[in-house]
Image (cartoon, coloured by chain):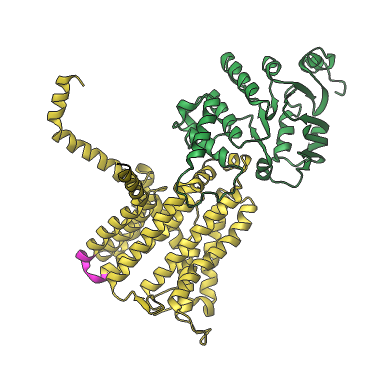
Amino acid sequence: MTLLKTEQLGVRFGGIWALRDFTVQVEQGAVHGFIGPNGSGKSTLFHLITGHYAPTTGEIYFKNTSLSNLTTDARARLGLTIKFQITSVFEGLTVLENVLLGLMGRRSPLSGFFSGTVAPADRDRALEILETVHLADRRDTLAGVLGHGEKCWLEIGMSLAAEPELLLLDEPASGMGREETKQTARLVRNLSGTRTIMVIEHDMEFVRAVADTITVLFKGELLTAGTYDDVKNDERVIDAYLGRGRKNG
Amino acid sequence: MINKKVVQSKVAHLRPGFQVLALTLIVGTGAFLYRGSPAVDQATIWVIYGLFAVSIDILWGYCGMLTFGQAVFFGLGAMCYAWTTTDTWFPHVDWNPALAGILLSILLPALLGLVLGYFLFYGKVRGPYFVIVTLALAFLMQALGNGWTKVFGGFMGFFGVPTASVELGGWSFGLTTPLTRYITVSLLLAGVVVVSARILRGPFGLRVAGVRDNDQRLEYLGTSTVKTKLVVFIGSAAIAGFAGALFASTSGFVSADLMGTLLSTEAVIWVAIGGRMTLIGAVLGAVVVRGFGYIISSIAVEYWTLFLGALFIFMVLFGSKGLWVIGGSAAARLSRLLEGRRGSRDIVENRTTGR
């Protein structure tokens, strides 16, 4: 079943099409990898899906509903959350509070208004999530003092806490060492199954380890799609990465 | 054992209220000893300003939205009370003027907050732009109030606004003496602080903290920051309006300047001095600044603003956490020092046992 699809999606900034005529289908339960050289439109695609940018052309359908008229937060409540390329957490709050905010994301802002405390069930669930992202022992630490890798995991945990059907991960392993990257790949693999995950990553090892399907973008357009082996041996992909594909100048 | 724990946690929830009452008790007694009943009436005003400061602390300290126009809601609340109690428009309506005034002083500022907030927050006005809009609002309302004599009393304002006396059924309650006024206002302040603290400690408070820390991140998790900000803005406006009505009832004089920039900015200074993100700190700031102002003014009026400015600069430079937090850590250090002296023998004993 298709969870998310885009139809002739395009966005133009000034004279440049950051993404053009882009059609893709993301199957439910799959880990869908997006690769491509810098500036090929991967992050732009994610920003269009979350509602950060408005498309110039085309449509995005999530669970067969058009996202066109929905605000960012409404899209998140519908079940799609994102881990940004540049890690963004609540630096002044504790690790546990960060995850709790994710947990409460899809509820009404006024839920538990007078209760005076966070429900024990929510707390337990948040601790469970911290366990999965290897941060259980840092729960009372301020998120701002975490290391880079830990912040990435926290952001994944926070996005996960909102119980999304579709999780967008924009370079979850960027800036990480080998061991951390492996751990992150295992984490992403474990999260898939019930959830659908779209992931952008430059590290090909990582992509090979996690992705079921890979879509390659180049200069804002779809270049090719398929499994890791299909993509790896595609001449056009090799050209694009080596910079030989400049047919149009 | 379990019962004791439950009782303890209940006391912990009421703690901000007790802190407020302890503070007002000290201030009230101090004022009475200094100048008797008239000083207690002055202290009542300080406590009301404390309530006003709480409304700013919720908006600025907790939600991160600095405002230079909060007095608009305070002044409007005071106007509401003055309108109903010195009513000449609806002579045939049989109502309880004080009670109607207090209710209106909460509802009308809340409504204004809703309308303003709706346009500001859906229009994505934030940060410095929000500050500028609030400042412009204060200028606007002050000019409007001074010009529109028929409604806002103009330069003369409303004199002789009666003190609140509420009659419900056969039960009547009049704030006729300085002492009853002071006690009632203190209790009301404590009540508002207890309820606000409870809300801010719960899930909603966490969302508010999320807005303050990183509102975009919060939006991408599904929480509507617009709605969250709107609720905070309305609540804060309602508290400011309520404080305004209490002010009108206590001082007996209401003018358009109450809605203006001077009170707005001074109130922000109270919160900065007393301490953001502690409701009691906001109260402390208002009471300390106004209290010292009262003492200094009776010695030399001309030095008052100089003193206020110097105190503000000093706090910004050396005590950005505010008086409440600084006082708290100083008290902790002092008690440790005293403890150390008393417990020196224990330490020696512990050393011998190797702990």
**Residue B69 visible in rendering:** no
Segment tinted magenta in the rendering: B32-38
Which of B248/A184 is in front?
A: A184
Outermost residue toward the right in this view: A247
Q: Is residue B33 magenta?
A: yes
Q: Is residue B219 above or below residue B252?
A: above
Q: Is residue B163 left or right of residue A212?
A: left
Quarter that holds the N terminus of chain B: top left
Quarter that holds the C terminus of chain B: top left
Residue at screen point 68% across, 31% down: A168
Q: Is residue A31 above or below residue B301?
A: above
Q: Is residue A248 left or right of residue B216?
A: right
Q: Is residue A11 above or below residue B56?
A: above
Residue at screen point 87% across, 20% down: A247
**Magenta span main SS:** helix
Chain drawn yellow, letter? B
